[in-house]
Image (cartoon, rainbow, N blue to C red):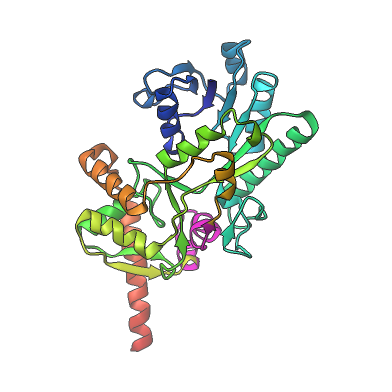
Amino acid sequence: MKALFIGGTGTISSAITRQLLEQGCELYLINRGSRNDALPEGAHVIHADIHDEAQVASLIGEMKFDVVADFIAYEPAHLERDYRLFKGKTKQFIFISSASAYQTPLSDYRVTESTPLSNPYWDYSRNKIACEDYLLKLYREDGFPITIVRPSHTYDERTIPMGVHGSNGTWQVAKRMLENKPVIIHGDGTSLWTMTHNRDFAKAFIGLMGNIHAIGESVQITSDESVTWNQIYEVIADALGVKLNAVHVSSEFLAACSKEDYRGSLLGDKSNTVVFDNSKIKRLVPDFVATTRMDQGIRETIEYILAHPEHQVEDGEFDIWCDKVISALDAAIAAINA
């Protein structure tokens, strides 16, 4: 198989890239070269900025591919460019959408590919919906061979999956745990969530590549495991060898008092209970099963990050904000009980 990835070194795509190369795929990556250390050995790297359409068009020339996948398209204009670049040059074009595009709040907590797409809380999700609409129009009217993939919360060894964190990532929350500081969990922590390790996601994604039954289809790829946020944070604390000191704060309050986009990431995503029905991906890829249990995957991630200080990125501003939120809640309780 000859494939081209736009991206290829991110959380979702890196495991796909590794597994494809192990299987002998002729893989090309369009990459600006800003993260050369993350480029996998064996891939053919096309050094270019995908936003420089003329440069990319010149470099790919008359090359044709079995699959082209865009992992970094976030708005219809990006896909309009992709269509101009790859029309007639690929047998399948895969777009990475998002499960956050699904109806929010849900009318039914069980999510399938037929769940309506509507998210009034998050621009990111609305842009993904617009991208899907554009691609489906191309498929219906021009026969452009698209496949839409909807991941949910996918993680790897480099980032601890959490709900509330700052712009510098999730390490600062782990650091607060190690320092026995209270950590914030949105809501009461009992809503259900699904986390998928990227190596499991990769198995299903690769099964869609070159799959004639996936053309024109939208497919979600997640684990079948549903856990509460309280369970997630307990597992993280246990992996760090500390006792969890949790403070539960409503998502609405967090969204109202932070410059982070918690309105989108919490109200439009993580504060809602979701249980994914993966029947469709299992029909399309019969041997797919997610085998990395949440607690096992998180323990691997914690071990890796503790052994790699370069991934321990601190976030002092977020740390101060957490203390302010918790102090404000304590003061409110004291005032009411006075």
Farthest residue, direction front = 286
Along the line of sight, the residue nearer the viewer: 293 or 81: 293
| x and y percentages locating residue 115 in the rendered image | 65, 55
| x and y percentages locating residue 268 in the rendered image | 55, 57
Specify start and end residues of the magenta stretch as a single range.
Answer: 252-275
Q: Is residue 71 visible?
A: no
Residue 87, above or below 11: above
Q: Left of 51 or right of it: where is 321? A: left
The residue under the point 36% across, 51% down is 293
| x and y percentages locating residue 160 in the rendered image | 34, 48
Q: Quadrant of residue 116?
A: bottom right
Q: Left of 148 or right of it: where is 155? A: left
Residue 154, above or below 63: below
The residue under the point 56% across, 54% down is 277
The residue under the point 32% across, 54% down is 295
Q: Quadrant of residue 300?
A: top left
Q: Quadrant of the C terminus?
A: bottom left
